[in-house]
Image (cartoon, rainbow, N blue to C red):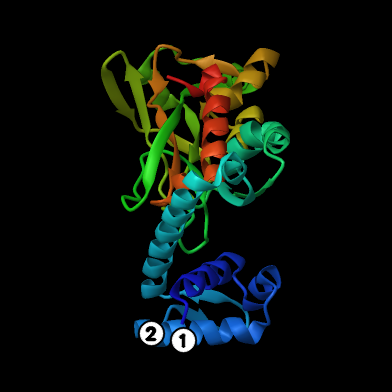
Amino acid sequence: MDRLKAMQTFVRIVEANSFTKAAETLNLPRAALTATMQNLEAFLGTTLLQRTTRRLSLTPDGADYFQKCLEILAAIEAAETTFRGAQAQRPKGRLRVALPGTLGRTVVLPQIARFCAAYPEVEPILSLSDQVVDLTREAIDCSLRVGQLQDSAFIGRQIGTMRFMICAAPSYLAQYGTPVQLDELAAHRCIAHFSGRTGRAFDWDLQHGAQVVRVEMRAAIAVNEADANISCALQGLGLAQLAVYQARPHLDSGALLEVLPAYSPTPMPVSLLYPQGRMGSSKVRAFADWLTALMRSIPDLQS
């Protein structure tokens, strides 16, 4: 058995999430891929893929082996590229990227044509969701994350800072008044933004210089998505903690007003996360550099 070819076949099956699709892209009969996987699993003495009529899924051993295959194949590509010249170093191929829904729609997608124009041989496959994606199981090359990183098995590079402010619609403030001191917040209602992953509402931790104060707020409505949060704020349902970059157009139009500007919600890091070995790929490096430059061009997404 050619173990390198078996690794490449296994990775392609996982990335395509289908024996049939993988066979088409490799220009091989499906039976050949089935035989390769049977031989590979027999050689390793473990099951790598769970097969059902509807989908494929990695076993725990399969996820671990998949990650190691990516690292080995990336190292081989990097070693070969050194000797094959500039032509081989051009970014190309499919690039799977996971993006947070609102940040992806508002910041990345309006500019993605520029990346495609700069790297015409790269085929971006963008997945937009506020759910935390398993990079290994979903065969994701890199993921943009907001908040503290929990995936210690991956590499994270901070490329921005998500800053927040407290906002409200003029209609809400006309009805309930504008708070000017923290203790006045007890008489107000808020739009609670809860995590779609944990189900827990984000705290109202407000910074004033070096001091951080946690305020207990009474929720008028709870949502789990940033666009829904700002939609409720625009309708005057309560005070809201909104990302500055997202609130900016509504502040400029007067549809929202900033409240308690001396107290800002604690910021969150914005990071690019990728599996070990993926940064050796020229297409991932190209996207990482482009996305870093894009984030740095937006003052509201920097410290």
**Is label 2 in a helix, a strand or a loop?**
helix
Q: Position of residue 30 (x, y in %)?
A: 65, 82
Residue linked to disc 1: 39
Q: Is residue 212 left or right of residue 143?
A: left
Q: Amino acid at mark 2?
A: Phe
Question: Against 224, is 213 above or below?
Answer: above
Q: Is residue 226 left or right of residue 39?
A: right
Question: Against 116, is 159 above or below?
Answer: above
Give me the disc on residue 298.
Answer: none
Residue linked to disc 2: 43
Question: Against 239, is 20 above or below?
Answer: below
Tag 2 near tag 1, CB within 8 Å: yes
**At x 58% / y 16%, what residue is drawn?**
257
- Evaluate whether residue 225 shows in this view: no
**Quadrant where the C terminus lies?**
top left
Question: Against 36, is 5 above or below?
Answer: above
- Evaluate whether residue 10 shows in this view: yes
Q: Position of residue 21 (x, y in %)?
A: 68, 72
Q: Amino acid at mark 1?
A: Asn
Asked which quadrant contains residue 202, the reply is top left
Q: Nearer the viewer, residue 1 or 260?
A: 1
What is the spatial separation of the Cα atoms under label 2 and label 1, in whole angstroms?
Answer: 6 Å
Q: Position of residue 200 (x, y in %)?
A: 40, 48
Q: Nearer the viewer, residue 13 or 75?
A: 75
Asked which quadrant contains residue 217, the reply is top left
**At x 45% / y 54%, what residue is drawn?**
74
**At x 44% / y 75%, what residue is drawn?**
3
Q: Nearer the viewer, residue 161 or 67?
A: 67
Q: Position of residue 179 (x, y in %)?
A: 46, 16
**Is label 1 in a helix, a strand or a loop?**
helix
